[in-house]
Image (cartoon, rainbow, N blue to C red):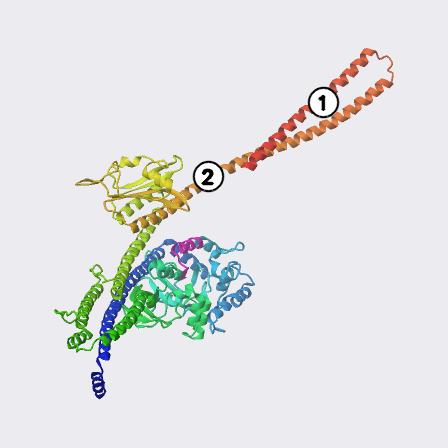
Amino acid sequence: MNLFIRIREFYKNLNLFFKFQTALFLVSTTTLSVIGYFGYNEGRRLLELRSFDLLVNITSNKKKAIEEYFSQMQKQMEILAERSSTSGAIKDFSEIFDKDPENMSPKAEVELKKFYEEEYLKLLKYNAGVNDFQTNFFPSSPLRIHLQHKYLAQNPNPLQFKYNYSSPKENKDKYDNLHQTFHPNFLNYAKKLDIQDILLVNLKGDVLYSVAKRADFATNLLEGAYKESSVGQLFRKVITGSDDKKIYFQDYENYLPAYFEPLSFMGGVVTRNGQKYGVIIFQVSTERITNILTNNQKWSEDGLGNSGEAFLIGPDFKLRNRTRRSLEDPAGYYAALKSKVDKVTWERIKRLGTTITFREYKVQATINAIEGKSGTQTNVDFLGSEVLDVYMPLDFLGTRWGILTEMDGAEVFAATTAFRAQLLSIAIGLFIAVTLLGTWLARSLAAPMRKIQKEITLLSEGQFPKKSDTIYKDELGKIDEALNILVQSMRNVAEFAQNIGRKNYDYQFKARSDKDILSNALLEMRDSLREISAEEDIRSWRNTGLALFGDVLRENNDTLEMLSKAVVAELVKYIDAKQGALFIFDEKTQSLKPTSAYAYEKYRYLQQNFKEGEGLVGQVYFEKASIYLTEIPKDYSNIASGLGHIKPKCLLLSPMITDNKIYGVVEIASLNEIPLYQRLFIEEVAENIAITIANIKAGEETRKLLIESQRAGEQLKQQEEEMRQNFEELMATQEEMRKRQEQLDILIHSIQEAGHEFETVQYEGMSMTLRQQMLDNIQRQKNILLEKDAENQKKEAFIRAKVAELGKNINEL
């Protein structure tokens, strides 16, 4: 207190130069600090509230998606548990487990031990980070050894793909035949529902069947090595439950048969006509849950920016999904995590490639979520960074998890951080200006300034003094006038800042000049906050629309007619238009054919086709570019209602293009102008429609090509058969010609010898007439042979030409 009195007394004794200089400094600094403080904190608060609203919406959507996934799994398990095929499979497999094995290989035990030592236990120890297990995992009975030897050791598929093995090709026994009957159906069911494994267990605890074929196959869950595993616990929970219709859930644990991978399971009783047969167990798809939380690793499309992510937290406060950092940058994540967890846990996370059940995240947000509370708060993550947290409880199948969505504060408050730096720069500039101005004024003033001192004192205390009515024309009058202007400016700025805090971005405020740094900075802050608000609304509208039309296209892609009706109706409703139509290019007629319309006055208007370049529809198809009109043609269709007709105010036609190929045109008419962001959205939807149309047409073309291929194959077989027959005929003809050539050669040789003898030998009693007859006869035989030889040569040439023609046709086919 004494120190303050001494300082005050010291200040009183200062000359007017230093007093005036100090007063101006305090006035400017206090005003700027107050405005900057409230402006900065209000902007930060608004950004925080909007970010929390976004994260709450994202968290709610992901929570709903996970709840729907488990609800679907529960329904599918209830259906499968009541099917006669399921109870029949358990019954038939159980009969085999009560008997000795058939055709058991003498090498079964040796080969199965080799499988356990070289494959199963080796990988299990590596993933778990242990040198040995105290439990004996090897099966205890000949039947279990026999089955594991067949479906594990002799299974030719890799460890993660042993489900592809249906049955042995040789030495099949009764179990192999049953397995070959049931396995394809259960495998297809698992793939269709994205289930990693299905187990059938009888009431004695025998694992009769599994899709995945892990080391738990053919073991006993009441007495075997895995009785205390998560599957063993789930089995006992199901068979001891009082309600046979209830589906139970077993939370994530490190499952030894899956090589220490963290897994969760669902189980229910298999009944038929009131009789209990056994238990069916599903392995929950960890990948499916991760895809829901990460939006298939497209976080930015989910509104989570560059740092946001969603977590699932179990009752033990450990993660139930892989984190964003571990998926985007595994090496960097492992390096950052190494100092946060013990060495064994770190090695397991790195080897298994997952954080599920290994990384603990126990903060107040996760504690609240597990306690059933929902809310928001700021927190510090494991790297020491400020984050925004939104938490909610997630209840399903008697289990409670917590769902937490988190976003880095640095990303959320980037705009306010830049504004704070700008305010600091302004403050420094004003401090320099005020200091220089105070020095100049202090040097030029000598008269008392009680009035001005009082007003400045009030202003320094955060109060706005009254305006001076009398302004003198001397230097003091100018100072008084300047002070009046400053006070009014501060009032305006304060009122403007308050309106910004109330989200009244339309409040009229104008900077006094281009050099009014503070006012311009506040105006820039207002514009930035307004743009952020508007952009966020548009982004949310666009993302919701893309998701909606993604579902519409996926659910209505059987035919072009079904697709057209669904897309046009949904598009008109979503953008609040009044009419819509879809035109698809017909390859046969080479024209744009209307396939669907919504709310047109005359349906026959859509019965006409458009050639390329014909009308607005044809012009859009020709130019492959959208057309937006606010002056509607006179002959355009009216929008009709029960009370009358009216012309639309605007018309939008967008081409449906993908991979630089156009498939049609979508036409929208509205009573209000369509803003740019909606037009861009319609073009995006049109591209997605084009992709779907291309897929539908590709499917139809594939079916046509298959039919043509089958027809060509039949024609090829006929051509080959005809060529084979001609070839055989050619070979027979050549053989006949060879024989005739030999006969001809012999005959010619005989004729030559006979002619020579005839010329040299004198026949007694032979007249000239008889000799001439003999020569004529020989010549006739020779001519006959020569004619047949020429005929065979023509026939051979014809067959050769026919064979060549058939060969050419076969090559073309």
Q: Which mark is residue 786?
A: 1
* 499 relative position to 798: left or right: left
Q: Nearer the viewer, residue 672 or 421?
A: 421
Q: Which residue is mark 2?
A: 707
Residue 758, quarter of the rendered image: top right
Q: Name the kind of residue labelled 2 in the image.
A: Ile
Q: Position of residue 337 (x, y in %)?
A: 42, 71
In this rendering, is residue 160 above or below 345?
A: above
Can residue 403 be spotted in the picture?
Answer: no
> Which residue is found at the position 18% from the left and 41% from the top?
642
Can residue 647 be spotted in the picture?
Answer: yes
> Which residue is found at the position 31% from the left and 34% from the top?
608
Q: Name the kind of residue labelled 1 in the image.
A: Leu
Is residue 196 found inside the magenta-colored segment of the image?
yes
Q: Which residues are magenta?
A: 183-201
Residue 636, quarter of the rendered image: top left
Q: Position of residue 658 (x, y in %)?
A: 40, 46
Q: Position of residue 474 (x, y in %)?
A: 17, 71
Mark 2 lies on a secondary structure that is: helix
Q: Nearer the viewer, residue 567 or 576?
A: 576
Q: Quadrant of the N terminus?
A: bottom left
Q: Position of residue 35 (x, y in %)?
A: 23, 69
Q: Nearer the viewer, residue 720 or 76?
A: 720
Q: Nearer the viewer, residue 104 or 619?
A: 619
* 359 relative position to 497: left or right: right
Give the Cα separation between the discs numbered 1 and 2: 53 Å
